[in-house]
Amino acid sequence: MKLLPVAPLLLLLLTTLEARPKPAALKCRTGPLDIVFVIDSSRSVRPFEFETMRRFMIDIIGNLDVGPNATRVGVIQYSSQVQNIFSLKTFFTRAEMERAINSIIPLAQGTMTGLAIQYVMNVAFTAQEGARPPHKKIPRIAIIVTDGRPQDRVTEVATQARNAGIEIYAVGIQRADMNSLRAMASPPLEEHVFLVESFELIQQFGKQFQDKLCGVDMCVEQEHGCQHSCVSTPGSFYCECNPGYRLNVDGKTCSPIDACADGRHGCQHHCVSTRGSYSCRCRPGYYLGQNKRSCIMIDYCSFGNHSCQHECVSIPSGHYCRCRSGYTLQPDGRSCRATDLCNGVDHGCEFKCVSTEGSYHCMCPEGQQLQADGKTCSKCGAGHVDLVMVIDGSKSVRPQNFELVKQFVNRIVDLLDVSPHGTRVGLVQYSSRVRTEFPLNKYHSADEIKKAVMDVEYMEKGTMTGLALKHMVEHSFSELEGARPLSHNIPRIGLVFTDGRSQDDISEWARRAKESGIVMFAVGVGKAVEEELRAIASEPVEQHFSYSADFTTMTHLVENFSLNICPEEGKGETEIRSPCECEALVQFQTNTVAILQSLTEKIAQMTARLEDLEKQIANKK
């Protein structure tokens, strides 16, 4: 079809058509259609020409039956880029569309028509932008209006768009290239390619072109039988149901749907179906939010009657009280008391943990300093000892507890300054037999010893503590196994660990150990016998034996051991303590005791005098 500017009479006719009202009977009512206008707004389109394009779109839309279930319309403009003015889902009234079209600002750049067709295919006719699904057979129509030659390739992308089910009308104006129009349009070309020789005639062309989009309304022409609504398609129709209903298998009647069943209701707790709709409800302890879907827990604490000393915590069934960190909730469920964190947490203190209100801190033995980590103490580095630890590997210990024993051993090693010329450490394990795990001269660093300790294998079987003491005295403290000669004044310390009663006599070899100059420490756990521990321990016994009821609470045993071993440590191979030092210390203690006794006597005398004065005052009254 080719329109030419022929005579003033035609212009007069155009003016008359433009001025007369559009009767409702002329509306295109065959719908529904999905129509996207693709408008060229390149720099070659002058302002008054672009205004004519606006009228072209508005006139066509004015003769369509527009609505969500009828014809949907979208508009894009393009130049060197593509701009979406409004999509198929944006507006459903002609007035809204007209306002949007009148507010378009031309891009005034190049002419990338192929890019625009690509956008139409990939974006404009997608379900996300409002296009109806293919199974509904709604025609998808793209109307491309351009005045020039494309600056990109259009043939291939237009073919892809047509193969995707898009019917393309190509409308060229003035300078448009006919070959490009034919490459874009759908067949038959004589029905889809139009060249309008001037912008002045495009508006009249629009009135004629809209007839191409209209046909027979099948819903009007025949008895459709649809219970709710009938939707025309080219040459046919189909039935649709109102919201809240579904189409039955007969394709005509409708039944109410369970709006809760499809899971799209969005109710956080419960969905309650009603005819064609639904409502949301909440579980006890919650109330419905403003969006009528989400549920908000009732804040019972905000009522102000909870009586919690520290914190109130709301729950669906009511509330409960909670204490701040470092406190324990009392049986009344409301008040709080400071927690002894030293017993309740893994405090990590190497020597001693001291609880304070809501917290704790670590302490070290006298003569040692707390390290930067706030937990470990400076090692007993000023002196050197030969230490042999004898650990119980009997069946009653059990494998998991034996691992705790090894950890106990390594915590003691952490207290020591291990080196060939400093402290030396040996390890003996016993059950029904005795085995040297490593002698005093085997390892020369704490890390080596700790690794060797963790590699020790559990022996199991009996508890021959006496046999273990014999082995320690005869072998472990021999120079052959690394003990330094007695003449070097290096203290020899034996630490015996046991969890039960010995199956042999311990008294003889415990006595011989102490007589040979070994300072003996006894550590018991669980079913260990106090009498045996005291028999093993050196004098004063209270400082040389320790007991714990459970393997998991042995930390304080390490503390006791470090407290007693560090002040007693030797200071090198050649040091011999001066007896004067001991005599001076004894004299100082004697003098101190005498002064304290004198002060006590004076206080007693003053107290007696005060009582006499009080009696005299009472008698005078």
Image: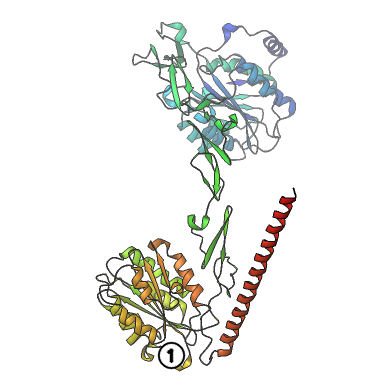
Choose between 512 and 225: the one closer to the eye.
Answer: 512
SS type, badge 1: loop
- Residue under circle 1? 484
**Residue 4 in sight:** no
Quarter of the image where one finds residue 377: bottom right
Q: How is the image coloured?
A: rainbow
Badge count: 1
Q: Residue at x 43, y 72 (%)?
A: 410
Quarter of the image where one finds residue 393: bottom left
Q: Residue at x 50, y 91 (%)?
A: 573
Choose between 527 and 598: the one closer to the eye.
Answer: 598
Picture layout, residue 120 above or below residue 221: below
Image location (x, y in percent) of residue 575:
54, 91
Q: Quadrant of the N terminus?
A: top right
Image location (x, y in percent) of residue 442:
39, 84
Image location (x, y in percent) of residue 348:
51, 63
Picture layout, residue 493 above or below residue 26: below
Picture layout, residue 173 above or below residue 332: above
Answer left or right for 119 relative to 229.
right
Answer left or right for 536 relative to 574.
left
Choose between 448 and 251: the one closer to the eye.
Answer: 448
Q: Residue furthest front?
A: 619
Q: Residue at x 54, y 80 (%)?
A: 381
Going by the numbered disc 1, the residue's amino acid type is Arg
Callout 1: 10 Å neighbours few (<14), some, many (20+)? many
Picture layout, residue 190 above or below residue 604: above
Image location (x, y in percent) of residue 54:
67, 22
Answer left or right for 49 relative to 395.
right
**Residue 568 in sight:** yes
